[in-house]
Amino acid sequence: MTAIDHDRQGIVFDIQRYSIHDGPGVRTIVFLKGCPLRCRWCSNPESQNPEPELFYRRSACIKCGQCMAVCPTKAIAYENPDFVDRNKCIKCGACTKVCPTQALKRAGKTMSIAEVMQELRKDAHHYRRSGGGITLSGGEPLFQHEFAKQLLMACHEQGWNTAMETTGCTTRDIVRDVIPFVDHVLMDLKAIDPAVHRANTGIDNRIILENALCIASLTHTVVRIPVVPGVNDSVEAITAIGNFAKLMPGVDTVHLLPYHTYGENKYELLGRPYPMADAPNLKPEDMTPFKAAVEGLGFNCVIGG
Ligand SMILES: C[S@@+](CC[C@H](N)C(=O)[O-])C[C@H]1O[C@@H](n2cnc3c(N)ncnc32)[C@H](O)[C@@H]1O
Ligand code: SF4
Ligand code: SF4
Ligand code: SF4
């Protein structure tokens, strides 16, 4: 087995403690940056770009000018309606260090495996008592595959359970290299119709579906479906995903995630338009016909999850 490189660095945009949703027991979720998809509904838009990015909260800005004084590329100007010219910004983070109100914040920072492990160790007793552990999310955790693998290996070395939320958009070699270190995969399937998938995520789904079959053959896998208005919120679309899940070895549970707009505000902070403007939040009760369809195929069905 490869030795763990504790100095290896990755770009992490959040570490959330005490989650009870994304795998068994009490968990810490590590969010990695970078994703090849651009789902129109993505609630973590700051995860998509592999590099650190700037959040600008206009309501917190007191127009003190300190950020402009330190910006090496003159990317910030009051005259600019977006405040920051993101094409000029080299993501050095200097402005975020001097901003007195945190109107400017950096999403994403470089961390080593050792630094992430130090954070995770704070809850090691919870993992042991509850059978929990860590969950890698993002972004697409397989985008920074070597960092993800080393982190998973370090967690296994501690005896912690490992889980991953993934959309499986990567090469087969990477799947075979990393998934053996994941105890529990939450495999997102967003649409079976390739045209629908491409129109709403920017990517064809052929490799994703092939990888989903491979992932399920390698480890315990649950299928997750974000149910999104105008994309897959029909019994036909959900049944098509369920029929595909029947082909995945060992899969007996499907999670339905009702579409929510919790991420909308973050698009504004990134200076980007929200692609799903006007689509309503779905409620758990809206899932009733989809749950019946999934259960009709013989799966356990959990709403949320
Ligand atoms: C942000 S993703 C990160 C993991 C991976 N990129 C993926 O898509 O599975 C984590 C989970 O959030 C779900 N999700 C993202 N945006 C959502 C939204 N607006 N409403 C409901 N679920 C959403 C995804 O479908 C996925 O199950
Ligand atoms: S991150 Fe650096 S380059 Fe970008 S706006 Fe801030 S100071 Fe300027
Ligand atoms: S440093 Fe912060 S508060 Fe001051 S002008 Fe820049 S963004 Fe606004
Ligand atoms: S695959 Fe996941 S992280 Fe990537 S854009 Fe879609 S929801 Fe967001």
Image: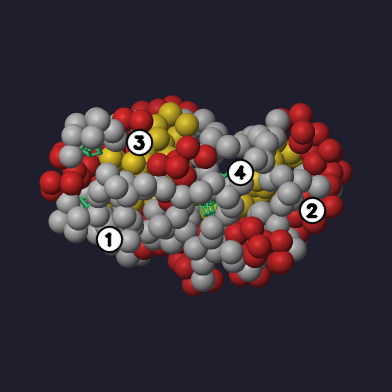
Q: Give percent across and percent down for residue 115.
A: 24, 45
Q: What residue is at 25 percent from the left and 48 percent from the top? A: 77
Residue at image location 35% in from the left, 36% down from the top:
57
Q: Residue under circle 2? A: 237
Identify the residue under disc 3. 58
Q: Is 78 on the left or on the right of 285, as rendered?
A: left
CA separation in Å, label 4 and label 3: 20 Å
Q: Is residue 208 left or right of residue 287?
A: left
Residue at (81, 47) in percent of width and height: 234
11 horizontally vs 36: left or right: left
What distance separates the C-alpha of mark 2 from that of mark 3?
A: 40 Å
Q: Is mark 3 within 8 Å of ligand 3?
A: no
Kind of residue indicated by mark 2: Ala
Judging depth in this view, the residue of 248 and 292 nearest the camera is 292
Disc 2 and disc 3 in contact, CB within 8 angstroms: no
Q: Crowding near pointer 2: few (<14 within 10 Å), some, many (20+)?
A: some
Secondary structure of residue under mark 2: helix
Taking 293 as reference, is 172 above or below it?
A: below
Secondary element under disc 1, as helix, strand or loop, is loop
**Label 1: which residue?**
88
Taking depth in this image into account, of 267 and 198 the one nearest to the observer is 267
**Where does residue 123 sit, x and y in percent of width and height?**
35, 31
Viewer-nearest of discs 2 and 3: 3
Label whose residue precedes the other's in the sequence (3 or 1): 3
Task: Quote the CA–CA distance across marks 2 and 4.
Answer: 22 Å
Q: Earlier in the sequence, mark 2 or mark 4?
A: 2
What is the distance, in whole Å, between disc 3 and disc 1 at their CAs?
19 Å
What's the CA distance linking mark 4 and mark 1? Answer: 28 Å
Estimate how packed mark 3 is, as few (under 14), some (14 to 19) or many (20 or more) residues with alpha carbons within 10 Å. Answer: some
Q: Earlier in the sequence, mark 4 or mark 3?
A: 3
